[in-house]
Image (cartoon, grey):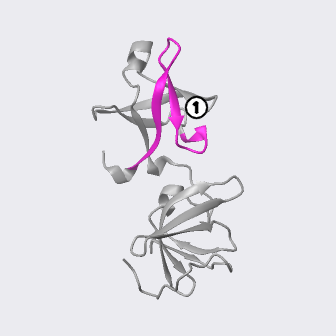
């Protein structure tokens, strides 16, 4: 598989019942990422990959139960415990303008609206109210938490691989970072 074309969305943690259902820890925000009749790619612990069609998906406590075509019994399912589950990025639902998948934002460079370098988005924290971008500057060893609010995030340009932010007072890094001062 070409890594850039796929997105890791879950991991098989156990089996459920005798009909080959997989108990999956989903990394997706919603079970809708596993579309019935959609396709997933399974990579087992030894690195073998196999594509399967989704038969059924339903929430189950903090996980999901996933039924795949070709996985018909408990023995077939047990062989997949520990397998990673991927989907093709092009099969993800299209988002509204101004809305992005986390994988699109993680890794982007972060600049203030006056072009001061802050670092790159290392990860994102879901807080319930709004996401928070964890921005690291490896050259300075600094980290800043930036709320993903319209009043703070001025612009996201995926082509330029850049996020421009207008930091409110008190969120500015403690030392001045000169424009163009990058690691």
Q: Is residue 43 above or below residue 181?
A: above
The quadrant of the image that shows the C terminus is bottom left
Q: Say above or below: 112 vs 53.
A: below
Q: Which residues are magenta?
A: 6-33
Q: Secondary structure at mark 1?
A: strand
Question: Foreground: 48 or 180?
Answer: 180
Q: Nearer the viewer, residue 177 or 55?
A: 177
Q: Is residue 43 left or right of residue 167?
A: left
Q: Is residue 16 rendered magenta in the image?
A: yes
Count of numbered tags? 1
| Residue drawn at (42%, 20%) of the image | 77
Residue 150 occupies which quadrant of the picture?
A: bottom right
Residue 98, by quadrant, is: bottom right
Front-most of residues 6 and 113: 113
Label 1, residues with CA under 10 Å away: few <14, some 14-19, many ≥20: some
Quadrant location of the N terminus in the rendered image: top left
Farthest residue, direction top: 18
- The residue at which mark 1 appears reads as 63
Q: Residue at x 44, y 64 (%)?
A: 107
Q: Main secondary structure of the magenta part?
A: strand
72 versus 4 height, above or below: above
Q: Is 55 or 8 nearer to us in this picture?
A: 8
| Extreme-right residue of the structure | 129
State the residue at coordinates (40%, 36%).
84
Rendered location of residue 21, percent (x, y): 50, 20
Estimate the x, y position of residue 118 in percent, counting from the top left.
50, 76
- Looking at the picture, how far across and down is residue 26, in whole percent? 53, 38
Asked if one can make out residue 72 in the rendered structure from this viewpoint, the answer is yes
**Quick check: is 68 in the magenta stretch?**
no
On screen, residue 105 versus residue 99, left or right, reads left
Residue 73 visible? The answer is: no
Residue 37, given in percent of the width and then of the height, sits at 51, 32
């Amino acid at each position: 598989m070409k890594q850039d074309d796929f997105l890791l969305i879950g991991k098989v943690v156990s089996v459920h019942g005798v009909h080959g259902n997989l108990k999956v820890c989903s990394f997706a925000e919603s079970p809708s990422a596993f579309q019935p009749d959609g396709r997933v790619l399974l990579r087992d612990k030894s690195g073998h990959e196999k594509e399967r069609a989704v038969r059924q998906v339903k929430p189950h406590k903090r996980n999901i139960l996933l039924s795949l075509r070709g996985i018909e019994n408990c023995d077939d399912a047990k062989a997949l415990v520990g397998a990673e589950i991927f989907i093709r990025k092009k099969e993800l639902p299209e988002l509204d303008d101004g809305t992005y998948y986390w994988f699109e934002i993680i890794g982007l460079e972060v600049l203030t609206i006056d072009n001061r370098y802050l670092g790159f988005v290392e990860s994102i924290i879901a807080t319930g109210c709004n996401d928070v971008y964890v921005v690291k500057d490896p050259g300075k060893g600094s980290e800043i938490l930036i709320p993903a609010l319209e009043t703070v995030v001025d612009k996201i340009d995926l082509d330029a691989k850049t996020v421009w932010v207008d930091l409110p007072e008190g969120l500015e890094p403690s030392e001045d970072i000169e424009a163009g001062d990058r690691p």
